[in-house]
Amino acid sequence: MDKEKIKEQANIDIFNLHKAQEQGVITEFGKGKLEALEGIVDFIDSLQEEPVSEELEDFAKRQADEFAEREYEVDSYDRDCLSKGYYWGCNAGAKWQKKHLWKSAEGPDLPIFDREVIALKGIVDPTATDCLCGYEVIFAHRPDTKGYDGKSITTGETKHYTPKTYGEGGWNIPNIVYWLDVELPKEIEL
């Protein structure tokens, strides 16, 4: 069970115990339980979470300072609150993005046609039936299913070509399992 589920259940119990306390029907045991549950929630909140980036706190502070100087005249307490708010927002956004970078290659969220992406290709064990034994990092894309018209260099004849696709996602390579939803760096122009 993860800490958020524990915290959620503890908060439900805390809410119910506070209601009993308001109605004057809480026992001494209930008061002790309430205090213990509030301690558990405080402890969970204090647990160190994996930092998204060491530079994130400095970035959030700089952003808050720039905003405070541009928009408002604020004292140091308000600036500190603003900085913490920016940090929380940046941290939450970075964690969300980190969790959603890799997407299923057969899910509803796929790259547009012909967008080149970094993908994980499943390596299938030839000795076992459909047994995935690892991944290979590759570039892949989803060819446009409408196809394209191409002109033969040798005959000059124009012909319509429909690309072969693989899997439910319609990839140009078989066994694509995940794709990375990030913009690739642009080529350097010389």
Image (spheres, rainbow, N blue to C red):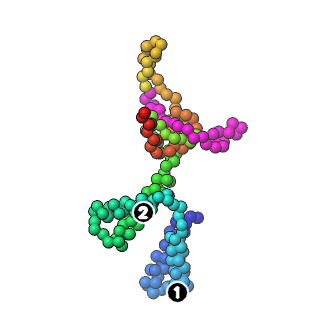
**CA distance separating discs 1 and 2:** 41 Å
Residue in the image at 49% along x and 53% along y: 98
The one of 89 and 112 positioned closer to us in this rendering: 89
Residue positioned most to the front: 190
What type is the residue that disc 1 sits on? Thr
Q: Quadrant of residue 138?
A: top right
The tally of labels here is 2
What type is the residue that disc 2 sits on? Tyr
Q: Is residue 176 above or below residue 46?
A: above
- The residue that disc 1 covers is 27
Residue 87: give its label: 2
Q: Secondary structure at mark 1?
A: loop
Q: Is residue 40 visible?
A: yes
Residue 94: give its label: none
Q: Nearer the viewer, mark 1 or mark 2?
A: 2
Is residue 169 covered in magenta? Answer: no
Extent of the magenta region: 122-147
**Residue 29, position in %: x, y?**
55, 85
Crowdedness near tag 2: few (<14), some (14–19) or many (≥20) residues, C-alpha within 10 Å: many
**Residue 46, position in %: x, y?**
52, 71
Residue in the image at 57% along x and 41% along y: 137
